[in-house]
Image (tube, grey):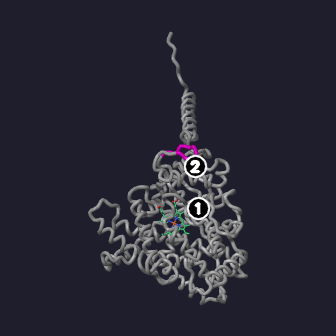
Amino acid sequence: METHTEFSPACCTMLVSVVLLGLCICFVFFQLRSRRTKNFPPGPPALPVLGNVLHLSLKNPLKDFERLRRTYGNVYSLFLGPKPVVIVSGMKAIKEALVNRGNDFAGRPQDLFVNDVTEGRGVILADYGPSWKEHRRFALMTLRNFGLGKNSMEERIHGELQYAVDTLAKNPGKAVSPGAMFHNMSSNIICQVLFGKRFEYDDEFLKVVVQCYRENAKITNGPWAMLYDSFPMIRNLPLPFAKAFKNFKTSQSFGLRLVAEHKKTRVQGEPRDFLDCYLDELVKRDNDDTTFSENELCSFALDLHFAGTDTTSNTLLTGFLYLMAYPHVQERCQQEIDQVLEGKLKAAFDDRHNMPYVQAVIHEVQRIANTVPLSVFHTTTKDTELMGFSIPKGIMIIPNLTSVLDEEGQWKFPNEFNPENFLNDQGEFLKPEAFMPFSAGPRMCLGEGLARMELFLIMVTLLRKFKFVWPEDAGEPDFTPVYGVTLSPKPYCMKVQLRAT
Ligand code: HEM
């Protein structure tokens, strides 16, 4: 007897539904299953597509990074969309990564928003390899050479400072907004080295280019950049991140104009500035296997200009904000400065050895300013290890410098502005190992020497001449920084009084 199995339409629908449901469950299971490979640093579970983006405030993730560190430790991982990222915190882990295993961690990501904005050129974001090595070595050597000799770096800094002194002296007792002044001053100091000239404070170059840098420093670590990095499908949409591309093009056109001018007027073997040195070098290396090229030059110079402008000026802005809020610290600096410089026309960088308190204040300003809070992102250059975890080649690394600059156990007063953090019981200056605002290891800031000289000479000269007072009608000072690649204080005004010297 034949039997027929017949399915009713309802039965078919149910079967299809069960199969679909099964597929969905499998899909969700595979998406939710930990995407972390064996012995990869731990971290919160990641959602399909979104990864851990919802764990972070896109506007300012610094507090979230700290919260996650308390749960997962000094080496943990997150997913930005599909991309795994390792966040390294605390002095011990950061030193192991950036110093002890420096070369393993010396790469730079090549697939981020900033790489697209800067068209993959320049030294700051160059991946670990011959081009980065050659350009870094050249920059260090050229900066050092410009520090020596007759028109030394100290003289250039003092020359530029005079303009700021004159500007401030014209406004005694008035409240002035120092933001543009510090940016212009830092920009002009590095401009003299790079391009052999300074620009008047109302020059288009300064006004336009410095504004582009300030904006890009905020956009680059901002919410739109994070979305751009996490979700590649939105990259071609006309969203607010497009402004950063426009800003880069604007700065580039100024840079290209300066390179063209230099090519016309230079004399081989008689370099006037950094651009000339590079152009000389290009001729010398003509037949060699070199990564130097005219195409690289503009981005290289703009990188140094950008890196030397926003960082130094934001540190100065933080410094003067705190010096006004802590007038007794300002006065003690002035006493020491008056005593050491008595009878001298101007300060020399070497005077710092006789000014332990001023040194302590400047370092404390750098610690509290936390100017580059997440350093510049690194990548691993090979399969490696960190604090016992395995990290494959090509993983993005975020060195959380903030977590070292206020790390409990490393500082006498981690959470307050207090120069005692840099003084021993005898009142001598000492620099704890956790002082890392310039990062550490092979990618460490290459402008550290210049930045330290600028901070010292500018702060000492201005404090010797003026007293800085928080305006009575300005309410309480707001110390909350504005987040970006660089942190900056909110715009503020200061009252300037001439000191009797
Ligand atoms: C207070 C001032 C400054 C601070 C706090 C600062 C901080 C930093 C930090 C944290 C990095 C990232 C290091 C890393 O990736 O691990 C860096 C890189 C860099 N800085 Fe600075 N910087 C300052 C001033 C300057 C100046 C004046 C120059 C100009 C010559 C400069 C040029 C650079 C360059 C070219 C890099 C990239 C180095 C590389 O990738 O090899 N910086 N800086």
Q: Are marks 1 and 2 in contact (CB under 8 Å)?
A: no
Residue for point 62% across, 54% down: 90
Neighbour class for label 2 at 10 Å: few (<14), some, many (≥20)? many
Residue for point 51% across, 69% down: 449
Cβ of disc 1 within 8 Å of ligand 1?
yes
Q: Residue 82 appears at what percent x and percent y?
A: 52, 48
Mark 1 / mark 2, whichever is N-terminal: 2
On screen, residue 465 versus residue 229, left or right, reads right
As rendered, which of 232 and 288 lies closer to the eye?
288
Q: Secondary structure at mark 2?
A: strand
From this view, report whether residue 318 is shown above or below residue 88.
below
On screen, residue 416 versus residue 371, left or right, reads right
The answer for how far apart the CA atoms under marks 1 and 2 are is 24 Å
- What range of the chain is rendered magenta? 385-392
Mark on residue 436?
Answer: 1
As rendered, which of 456 and 46 lies closer to the eye?
456
Residue for point 56% across, 56% down: 399
Residue occupying the far left of the picture = 287
Q: Residue 305 appears at what percent x and percent y?
A: 47, 71
On screen, residue 408 versus residue 449, left or right, reads right
Q: Tell me, yes or no, if residue 207 can be seen here.
A: no
Residue occupying the far top of the picture = 1
Most common SS among magenta residues: strand
Screen quadrant of the C terminus: bottom right
Q: Residue type at mark 1?
A: Met
Q: Residue type at mark 2?
A: Leu
**Does the magenta-highlighted stretch encompass residue 63?**
no
As rendered, which of 255 and 55 lies closer to the eye?
255
Q: Tell me, yes or no, if residue 165 can be seen here.
A: yes
* Of labels 1 and 2, the one closer to you: 1
**Does the magenta-highlighted stretch encompass residue 391?**
yes
Mark 2 highlights which residue? 78
